[in-house]
Amino acid sequence: AQKITQTQPGMFVQEKEAVTLDCTYDTSDPSYGLFWYKQPSSGEMIFLIYQGSYDQQNATEGRYSLNFQKARKSANLVISASQLGDSAMYFCAMREATSGGATNKLIFGTGTLLAVQP
Amino acid sequence: KAGVTQTPRYLIKTRGQQVTLSCSPISGHRSVSWYQQTPGQGLQFLFEYFSETQRNKGNFPGRFSGRQFSNSRSEMNVSTLELGDSALYLCASSLVGQGTPSTDTQYFGPGTRLTVL
């Protein structure tokens, strides 16, 4: 079965520093998509970045980059120059592959709570 | 473009009652998915609708049901509420829903927080 593992329940980072949030995944399907979402205390899930299994380059979106190591099945999120507003829960997710065809079902990890300190 | 909207934002119900939650996707999005988030179980997939058809279903009892209308708006219903149904219910929409990762990023609404007393 497909699975997402986030081993860091919580992390602290100083403002303006970079931080890496870990994510490992397990799948036997060669085609998959990996996502990172941010969830502030308000509850809304905010899309940050996407990496496709066939993408040759690591994805980047502004201050967010994804360190994709396919052989190790890891997709770590790197946030550069942390800001106070980055304090939130961060979820790694994978689109589940099914034999029946297309699906948008996401499998989520347990999340990492990031606290940015001034 | 307006984002995904969910109504109501907060609900308080008692055990045994039923509840209907509504989700309006981003304009042009045809795929709508529902998730339940609880402290104990995390984020769990409920079901996905595409073009008014349920395309995928999670491992939830039959008390949880949903539907999608021709304008892509979706509703989910929970009958005979239990204390364990207290959760944040999140709706997400995506553009195409054809399983192409680059085009099918899901965008989430603010959620409906349901409390069952």
Image (cartoon, helix red, strand yellow):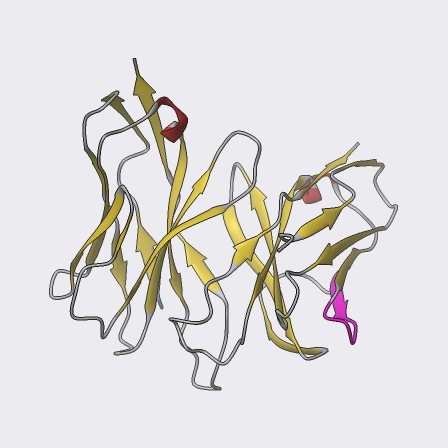
On screen, residue A22 versus residue B23, left or right, reads left
On screen, residue A35 versus residue A58, left or right, reads right
Residues shaded magenta: B64-72
Q: Position of residue A44 (x, y in %)?
A: 56, 41
Q: Outermost residue toward the right? A: B17
The residue that appears at 12% across and 60% down in the rendered structure is A72
The residue that appears at 62% across and 49% down in the rendered structure is B109
Query: Which quadrant of the figure has residue A68?
Result: bottom left
Q: Position of residue B2 (x, y in %)?
A: 65, 53
Towards the viewer: B91 or B35: B91
Q: Is residue B6 magenta?
A: no
Towards the viewer: A79 or A27: A79
The residue that appears at 22% across and 36% down in the rendered structure is A80
Q: Position of residue B66 (x, y in %)?
A: 75, 65
Query: Which quadrant of the figure has residue B73?
Result: bottom right
Q: Outermost residue toward the front? A: B1
